[in-house]
Image (cartoon, rainbow, N blue to C red):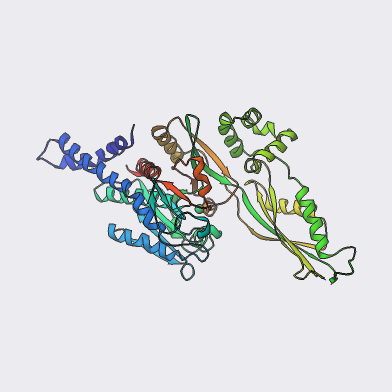
Amino acid sequence: MTFSEQVFSVLRITCLVVALTSLTAAPGSAAAAADTSGTSVTQAFIDAAPDRLAAYIKVDTTNPPGNEVRGAEFFATIFEAAGIEYEIAESAPGRGNIWARIQGGRQPGIVLLNHIDVVPADPRHWSVDAFAGLIKDGYVWGRGALDMKGTAIAQLQAFLALHQAVENGAKLSRDVVFVATADEEAGGAFGAGWLAKNRPEIFAGAGFLLNEGGSANTAGDDTLIMVEVTQKVPVWVRLVATDQPGHGSAPTQTTAVTRILRAGARLADSRFPVRAIPAVAELFAGLAPYQVDPQLRAGFADIGEAIKDDLFVRYLEAVSPFQHALVRNTCSLTTLEGSSKINVIPPQAALELDCRILPDQNEAEFLAQIEAIVNDPQIEISKIMSFSPAVSPASGKLWSQIEKLAQRRYKNARVIPSVSTGFTDSHFFRDMGITSYGLGFFVIPAEDFRGVHGNDERLGVENLKQGTAAMLELLYDFTVR
Ligand SMILES: [Zn+2]
């Protein structure tokens, strides 16, 4: 079934009600006339997406400092024109968040979540102005096109179309809430995290949430719709070594710097145990048929078995660090602080670790493992930040709607639950018990992947339109009674 057929059938239910109240025309023809206009109205929301994305990109919301209130005002203007009530809240001056709700029935509601902020764009490395909102060569160019203003616009247009349908008499089985937040790129403390804590009423009654973190890719003749259901959990750790300070001309047997370097070397040489959690095993099995490398193809099919072979694990680590990071806890050594002067042995030296643990890992046990590896009583270990872990089920009503939609809209579609090594704002809502999916309907060609947080970020105009249409269709399927 094509998209317009699908919307046609959804709208027909609404329109038949209108037709049945009309005595001046035969029900069939009245319904047909109304269907045609309804479909074209829906198409207008899809066709408007590229210009709308271009306008949104012009709103500079680079984080830091964010200035997300500008983005909130961008949405507010649109909501006002459509007659949709909304609220804006600033978690700190300029750190704007906005939300709006379409009322529906008593089924658990669905939240459309997107973040307003974008990472900086260095003009020296861009071939276009990252904030000009340029549309050329079939692409919308600019910072945020992929992460995640493009998805925000797909959500917005779907939300507006749904609101229009309700105005025309459609009945929804559940509430639909549009939420645009500040600060995701810096951890979400001023955005999703702040709303979860200070405005929990926004999410009351919600059972589902759609966010960034998923992707759609082609693999041969197939389209893989990767729906993110969980993520590695960041545990950021700081090590501080303390020892006698002194003059660089007279080295001692141990110093704060040598302690921290030795601990760092032990950590760098350590590997945490491998294991495949169910979500990861499912992901690898889904990807197995698409592996060109026969060793990976065989291993992915049963990753739990394959990782018992240390040679396989080492090979995976060498060829695919991201996939390797899904089968064990990891720590990257990142910031390092020693003396600020070349001839001074400092009293303290520090090392920070970006550790990511599997979502079922007990955090205290993990920190005990770090302590055992560091094995130095003069190094103090403290946790800077961590999240609580949660996995959303790759099953249930929304999941099956996504599968049905994928079958209809994409060639040889396969919906695969995915696990991300990075994190998004979804963890705040998984903590609340809301089934949260990272879902991306844009089929991004490999050559455009450089654009996420990179230079010359862009999203194809047709890609944006088909992604918006898919989002719209999913929302209709999931909410219109
Ligand atoms: Zn993002």
Where is residue 387 drawn, in percent x and y? 60, 55
Q: Nearer the viewer, residue 204 or 141?
A: 141
**Residue pictured at 61% horizontal, 35% vertical:** 281
Where is residue 324 drawn, in percent x and y? 66, 41
Left or right of 71? Residue 383 is right
Left or right of 350? Residue 85 is left
Where is residue 132 drawn, in percent x and y? 41, 58
The N terminus is located in which quarter? Answer: top left
Where is residue 460 drawn, in percent x and y? 41, 45
Left or right of 34? Residue 135 is right
Does residue 65 appear anywhere in the picture?
Answer: yes
Left or right of 81? Residue 253 is right
Total count of labels: 0
58 relative to 160, above or below: below
* Residue 320, quarter of the rendered image: top right
The C terminus is located in which quarter? Answer: top left
197 relative to 327, above or below: below
Q: Nearer the viewer, residue 62 or 18?
A: 62
Q: Nearer the viewer, residue 416 or 221?
A: 221
